[in-house]
Amino acid sequence: MRFLFLYVSMTDRYNSYNETLRRRFGCRVQKISINAGFTCPNRDGVKGRGGCTFCNNQTFFPEYCVPQKSAVQQMEEGIWFFRRYEGQKYLAYFQAYTSTYAPLEVLRGLYEPVLEMEGVAGIVVGTRPDCVDGRVLDYFAELSRRCYVMIEYGVESTDDATLRRINRGHDFATSVRAIEETARRGIGVGAHLILGLPGESEETMMSHAEAVSRLPLDMVKLHQLQIVRGTAMAAEYEVAPERFRLFSADEYIGLCAEFLARLNPRIGVERFVSQSPKGMLIAPDWGIKNYEFVARLERELERRDVRQGMIWRADV
């Protein structure tokens, strides 16, 4: 089985959102992924067909995580796996595809039962910024008064040319509106960004840090670009690999350090890398675990004497 382990950094050089969670709950916190059988408007024809060029959702799922099982059953299996850690709390992570892409009544029927389970402290919902509306956000606002709620938006890039190139189906302004409306209601809000998308220079990637720093975000997740089997990007890479710049681990560590230096220190960072299953990953294959990468990054931050937000300017 594969699960989402929350690595807790003890560094003082960046704002670790995992450490924020530990302080909030006073214990270890474990996310349990749930595949509730959602689809995506960029796959079913509402926005487009085929999805984003980088996306193969099968890279996210532990073995237990199949929509034929109820959300409660998936949570039970995940909690059973981690039963050896006494006194911890769990977050139900609705991760697969677009996890608000259903009528509100259906969403209630999925979210509410897992929140009644012992040890479950809240939910994390991954979705697209063009797949929320006022009614859904009002519901999340009400829910957040009862438990922990985090809405994670797939922003991916702040550059509209890149978003068109990867067939994202929305622009950055859509992400800004969704994030602002979510935060305005007092709901926890996060953003996912991919560093290394085709056509983006390092200057463009650094501009992402500056753009998201102006938003009312609680946290960000960074992902290195990975070429994954079964995607349109994999087909493009096979034909024209020269169109892509895939970073080595050391190069990406340097990129993350530069990004952190420009990131508003108020925003927590939950993740720097993603890790696709070996059998699905084409490139880059670094051969290191996420926690090993973070340890190396923290050593590099020390070596460079970099701290989050050290060159961030609130007036930019």
Image (spheres, rainbow, N blue to C red):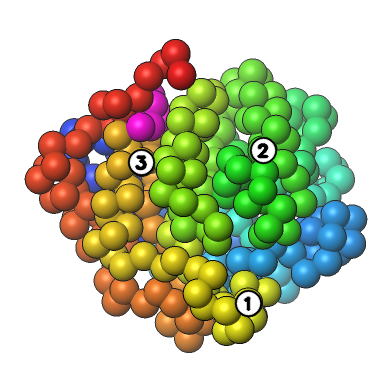
Distance from Cα at disc 1 to Cα at disc 2: 24 Å
Q: Is residue 243 left or right of residue 278?
A: right
Circles 2 and 3: CB distance less than 8 Å?
A: no
Residue 31 versus residue 140 in the image, above or below: below
Residue depicted at x 51% and y 32%: 212
Circle 1 sits on which residue? 236
Position of the N terminus, as image quadrant, is: bottom left
Marked residue nearer the N-terminal end (1 or 3) = 1
Residue 266 versus residue 11 in the image, above or below: above
What's the magenta region? 262-267
Marked residue nearer the N-terminal end (1 or 2) = 2
Residue 99: image x %, image y %?
70, 52
Circle 2 sits on which residue? 172
Q: Amino acid at mark 2?
A: Phe
Judge depth for marks 1 and 2 and give the one in front. 1
Q: Amino acid at mark 1?
A: Glu
Q: Residue furthest top?
A: 315
Distance from Cα at disc 1 to Cα at disc 3: 27 Å
Distance from Cα at disc 2 to Cα at disc 3: 19 Å
Callout 1 secondary element = helix
Q: Amino acid at mark 3?
A: Phe
Residue depicted at x 29% and y 65%: 249
Q: Is residue 183 visible?
A: yes
Q: Nearer the viewer, residue 216 or 113?
A: 216
Main SS class of the magenta portion in the image: loop
Callout 2 secondary element = helix
Q: Is residue 33 visible?
A: no
Residue 40 placement: quadrant? bottom right
Residue depicted at x 26% and y 52%: 254
Label 1, residues with CA under 10 Å away: few <14, some 14-19, many ≥20: some
- Which mark is drawn over residue 259? 3
Please say whether residue 265 is one of the residues in the magenta stretch. yes
